[in-house]
Image (cartoon, helix red, strand yellow):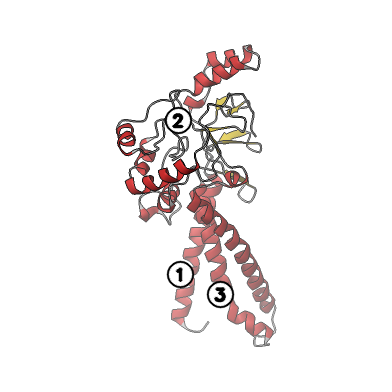
Amino acid sequence: MTNIGEKVVCLVAYHIFFMLFVWSYWKTIFTLPMNPSKEFHLSYSDKESLEREPRGESQQEVLRRAAKDLPIYTRTMSGAIRYCDRCQLVKPDRCHHCSVCDKCILKMDHHCPWVNNCVGFSNYKFFLLFLAYSLLYCIFIAATDLQYFIKFWTNGLPDTQAKFHIMFLFFAAAMFSVSLSSLFGYHCWLVSKNKSTLEVFRAPIFRHRTDKNGFSLGFSKNLRQVFGDEKKYWLLPVFSSLGDGCSFPTCLVNQDPEQASTPGGLNSTSKSENHLFPAKPLRDSQSHLLTDTQSWSEISAKAEKGKVGMSNPALTMENET
């Protein structure tokens, strides 16, 4: 490059992309995955009862009692309360046990060997930004290197070792751009549908039925669950996701006499407008996602059309890994 302005623009843009890429990569690697809070762990008396009783209705009753006041809506394939034998806790919704980390991870997406960490509730936003800035970084390098790559094939470059570096750099950046674009596009689709990678392969099972879109609240609210309400933080690798990772709003949970009543305000609204609000309390940072009347009317109508048997399935213990 001979133009000073072109040099300055390229250097500034390069370092911005590079710093954002390193920052998001660092946060993805070193942000510890969040585990279920203490309320989901069995009490000492419940653990003793579970160990003392044979597998059967007595153990089911222990788990039912332990999960009675917890904000959980999903079940195992057999209709059981999701319980982890290794961690000895009732699994929150969207929580799974990672065999590599040997612990339960909130809203686990997958265990990523590229970052040597579990991607879940605590670092999913960082992982998305890492993919985005990696892609922009590679595209920028490939774009600025393209003219010299063309000169390489037309013999327009001096015959030095640097010409081979230019060829390698372009191929590496272009190949990573292709692979990253497909992975980033896939995770953008997951965010728009409010799904995790695990939920794509095995749809969440709710108390009365299986629904692959059970946690979807519409594109805008799905996006806000991951990136938060304040747009100024969306493009920065700082934690801004809504909620605590233990409870998530869903339109598919109906009022159940065995479950706790809805929080104040939501219960009266659901009765007067016939909305399908969750039957168990949500955290404050999640509850406000349920206040959009028009959106919830549309979701409720769809849920009513697809609703099937309302019988209460027998609860049996089933381990998940």
Viewer-nearest residue: 43 or 148: 43
Mark nearer the N terminus (1 vs 2): 1
Query: Regarding mark 2 in the picture, which secondary structure is present there?
Result: loop
Eyeballing the image, is 196 above or below 232?
Answer: above
Mark nearer the N terminus (3 vs 1): 1
Of badges 3 and 1, the one in the foreground is 3
Q: Residue at x 48, y 77 (%)?
A: 7
User: Circle 1 sits on which residue?
Assistant: 12
Q: Is residue 294 left or right of residue 164?
A: left
Q: Could you say which quadrant of the image residue 272 lies in? A: top left
Eyeballing the image, is 150 above or below 192?
Answer: below
Q: Are marks 2 and 3 in contact (CB under 8 Å)?
A: no
In percent of width and height, residue 39 lies at 47, 25
Q: Residue at x 58, y 13 (%)?
A: 49
Q: Residue at x 58, y 44 (%)?
A: 199
Query: Regarding mark 1 in the picture, which secondary structure is present there?
Result: helix
At label 2, the amino acid type is Pro
Mark nearer the N terminus (2 vs 3): 2
Q: Is residue 199 visible?
A: yes
In percent of width and height, residue 269 lies at 30, 36
Eyeballing the image, is 195 above or below 281?
Answer: below
User: Circle 2 sits on which residue?
Assistant: 71
Query: Regarding mark 3 in the picture, which secondary structure is present there?
Result: helix
At label 3, the amino acid type is Ala
